[in-house]
Image (cartoon, rainbow, N blue to C red):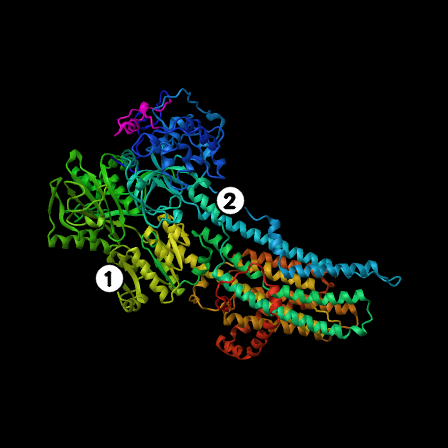
Amino acid sequence: MVPSTFNNRVQPIDEDSPVDPQTHQFPADPSFERVMVASHGRTPSSATTIRPPTAASSQLNPFATPATRSRSSSLATAIGAPPVDVDAALRPDPGTEADFKVDNNPFAFSPGQLGKLLNPKSLDAFRALGGLKGIERGLQTDVTTGLSVDEISAPYRISFEHAVNPYIKTSEKQVNIAAATVSGRFFDRARVFGKNVLPSKKATPLYKLLWNAYKEKVLIVLSIAAAISLALGLYETFGGEHPPGSPLPVDWVEGVAIVVAVVIVVVVGGLMDWQKERALVRLNKKKDDREIKVIRSGRAQVINVEELLVGDVIQLEPGDVIPVDGIFISGHDVKCDESTATGESEALKKTGREQVMRMLESGTKLKDLDPFIISGARVLEGVGSYVCTSVGVHSSFGKIMMSIRTEVEPTPLQVKLGGLAINISKWAVSSASFLFFVLLFRFLGNLSNDPRSPAEKASFFLDIFIVAITVIVVAVPEGLPLAVTLALAFATKRLLKENNLVRVLRSCETMGNATTICSDKTGTLTTNKMTVVAGTFGSTKFDKASENPSASSASVAQWSSALSQAAKDAIIQSVAINSTAFEGEENGQFAFIGSKTETALLQLARDHLGMTSVAEVRANESIVQIMPFDSSKKCMAAVIELRNGQGYSLLVKGASEILLNYCNQKVEVVTAGSATSLSINDLTPSDNMVISGTIESYARQSLRTIGLVYRDYQSWPPPEVHGDEEGHVKLSDILRDLVFLGVVGIQDPVRPGVPEAVAKAKMAGVMVRMVTGDNAVTAQAIATECGIFTGSHEGVIMEGPVFRTLGDAEMTAIVPRLQVLARSSPEDKRILVRKLKALGETVAVTGDGTNDAPALKAADVGFSMGISGTEVAKEASQIILMDDNFSSIIVALKWGRAVNDSVQKFLQFQITVSITAVILAFVSAVSHPEMKSVLTAVQLLWVNLFMDTFAGIVLATDPPTDRILNRPPQGKSAPLITINMWKMIIGQFIFQIALTVILYFVGGKIFEYDMSDPNRVDQLATMVFNTFVWMQIFNEFNCRRLDNGFNIFEGLQRNPFFITINTFMAGCQVAIVFVGGKVFSVVPLDSVQWAVCIILPMLSIPWAMVVRCFPDETFGRIVAIATKPFVKAYEVCARVFAPLTRLFAKKGKKSDGNGSESEKV
């Protein structure tokens, strides 16, 4: 019997369909009637052990259908297993009652009843629903052909009673639901059971985001102070006495301006958080997107996971992550890892329908019955199919996901920045506190001689307090987390466009520091567009490149035409039956779907050997056992029963040189004239050498070699091999005394651009290593073509079996030079990754198979294949290569470095402006007779908005240039602020503070202003503020480079955000000076003053060039000596003002559990 996994033919409705095409009635099921009488001698009518629910139990379960109240299912009662209380088996759990109620349900079951199958696994519920046959009928599906692609509404209405009791005659007329009243396919099915999507996580309302942005203690304190200032200003204006004819004071304007500025800061911060949430939602939606293989209308199809419906027949293969709940139909040795769903650590073997029936008949080993397929589990081995019973929020995995939705964890860079923010906050609070107390003591010292009114004195004191608080607002780097989020969001969005789907945000920044990449060959370095171009079967050979009849190798057409039908059949059986690929459609065209190696072999069989259909070949043979690909043995196998009961045949396909070692005979394809015949001869040493030479010659041409071998047996399992209770044996137990059929060479060209990408990686200080299952000769040829293998004098090529036996000292010596690891298993890859990490490397790894998951998890960054990768590999990875292309890894490397660079650029900019603003405010306030800072609270808030939000957007969205790959990666312990950054920070601080202080203190003399004129005083103060802001605008250009290069405009045209936002900020600053008036405490400037305010700040660009010429090493030594007193002073101030620092600490910041590391800069 051919399992449904391989039998894709549409079956006649009178054989397998549960519905009579004439009457729309379900026929009596002979298998069920057989079960009813088996071993008990009872007929359906004499099933006296049926235990209908009592009145009390019916009242306890108001959701039980009339059928369950009147009669139990046959499977629940009339077999060797103990009878089942149907009502109890299907009783709703508290809180799930709504799942059992469905209006106008044409199906026999509700989502709640189906959910009882796996809540937890319940054999009683399975039997109560009539077993697989009852579920098949009740869901109006077919376990062989699946759902009909033409279904719109349910074809008919079926009751619970009729679904679970096929022999009961019902008088209920089957009602066809009018399709004209609905739109779209599977309308009723989706309406009743739902779609396979989880409701989107409820977005945080904008008002909550605004409140979160406002909850900063420092902003609340500033708001309170602004409100008090506003109240005092209004009192002075409208409540006090004023000399006749004098204008009313407008001191209340500053309070209003501060309130408005706080509102703007909060609104912008809230909107940025809102945009960030939307970006993460889009990323998560894309991350969960994948395709599933199903059977619909008897044909295999690939559909999106969100299109799965209850009743779908879904195929299972090793490496699949099960998308929905269901019941196993049939297959070969399907074992699942359900640890993520149930906590069960052992691999669980699934029970097919035939075995379920036998075990239920006998009533024995019921504990071993496991036909349940749980969503979220992983298929470890075997192939098969199952019918879907629950999707979306009704599935096991859906329920778990709905209950554990959590926030995104901070990335390592965010944790490190959190420590830096704490240090800056300590400095800010210390500076502001020192400023406040100095001004307070001066205020108290002059209080006795102060002639002003109490309200004016209170207002003056409040001004001091507001300036101090505003200094904290400016100095505390609220924009640091925003900068990281913006950089990551921007990078992940751009990476998605360039075929990198980032599943874990931290991997994006980690990839920037990768020092080595362990890459697979097939599909990553090569195109994965495989074609059989050469082959040897006995004495016959073909080569697609050889069209000359006189050549030693015939063309493939000549070769195939000369083969006998027996030879063709032998090859067709080997490649069609021993395969998991199937026929389907891609982009509306016929195609083989599955492993590219297998599809290449099937294409050869179809095009040149006369194979008509894979499904037909499989249907004509009785498949006894399927043995999935074993990565340690490098092969896979299938067992078929020969026709006419002549025995069994084991078909094996895999790595040719490995399979050759298991053979002691060979098939000789003898050519006699225009015909060929088959004979089996012993495999002599000379034959072995000839075949090995053929394999090596193919490998030198960069061809993947696949061997085809077989062996016939009289019985299965063979007498010398111990099989399990189902007659299945392990692959490793039968790999001996095989017959070598032939070898093919499969061409898989190197991807265009891969050699260039490998060269870029080397230029970036990243070593690329090839880890492949191919033999060493093929691997060396491909690695040399890609530029990975640079010759035996520099690099090492080693095979997995040798590598895994190395001692620790030998491995430590070899691994740094290891460039190619051939014939490697996934365990070899994991060993290599762990050793590289132990040597201090930051490791990126690619993988596509289920067994690659440990290596992907062990790596710093795991890349899985979006096209050829299994779902297990994707779940274990952090980034999915949507095009399986190595060049996309280099793109990820560039953007990973761009994330780190963006944060460092912003950090360099913000620390410069923070230090300058705080020192300027402090110096000007302390030196002023009335203790007024040259930068008012409103001006400082504008600067804060400027540098925290706008600068964050500008610098976080700077795209990388190819120059970013011209430097080695940063080490794991590298400081966040480098020596070169400190050089620019201190250099720009000296320039900015010198220019503003000179302008403030001696500007009047330089420009020959009459400083007794209040208007001139206001103009000079406005010039200081204007100059300060324009210095920040020009310094943003300087901060675009982190190295000592001079070209700060490189790549500027590729960042429209930078140009647009800087233009906007410059326009706002011009508008503020012209019309800001009393709100910003500015007055209009003339053309000469404007020239001074723009030309002098522009000098920061040539000054930066001068700073960059200063040697980094010399600067580092000078700073180390000069900053010791300041560090001591900082430590003292930090201890003194620690309570204030904790007061203004940002809420929600959590330690990474290692304070010393998180605060390392």
Q: Is residue 180 above or below residue 918?
A: above
Q: Is residue 824 visible?
A: yes
Q: Is residue 44 magenta?
A: yes
Instruction: Give the farthest residue toward the right.
Output: 244
Mark 2 or mark 1: name the one nearer the start of the chain. Answer: 2
- Residue 1001 is situated, as x and y percent measured from the top left of the image, at 70, 74
Q: Is residue 1083 above or below residue 529?
A: below
Question: Dot 1 corresponds to which residue?
Answer: 802
Q: Secondary structure at mark 2?
A: loop
- Magenta stretch, residue numbers: 24-49
Question: Dot 2 corresponds to which residue?
Answer: 200
- Give whichever of 627, 53 is nearer the camera: 53
- Residue 1155 is situated, as x and y percent measured from the top left of the image, at 50, 67
Q: Secondary structure at mark 1?
A: helix
Dot 1 crowding, Cα within 10 Å, few <14, some 14–19, many 20+ = few
Dot 2 crowding, Cα within 10 Å, few <14, some 14–19, many 20+ = few
Q: Identify the residue at image location x=59%, y=58%.
A: 949
Q: Is residue 947 magenta?
A: no
- Tell me which amino acid carries mark 1: Val
Q: Quadrant of residue 303?
A: top left
55 sits to left or right of 773: right
Q: Identify the residue at image location x=55%, y=74%.
A: 1106
- Tell me which amino acid carries mark 2: Ser
- Residue 608 is situated, as x and y percent measured from the top left of the image, at 23, 40
Q: Quadrant of residue 253?
A: bottom right
Q: Quadrant of residue 768?
A: bottom left
316 sits to left or right of 1025: left
Q: Identify the residue at image location x=29%, y=51%.
A: 748
* Residue 632: mark: none
780 sits to left or right of 935: left
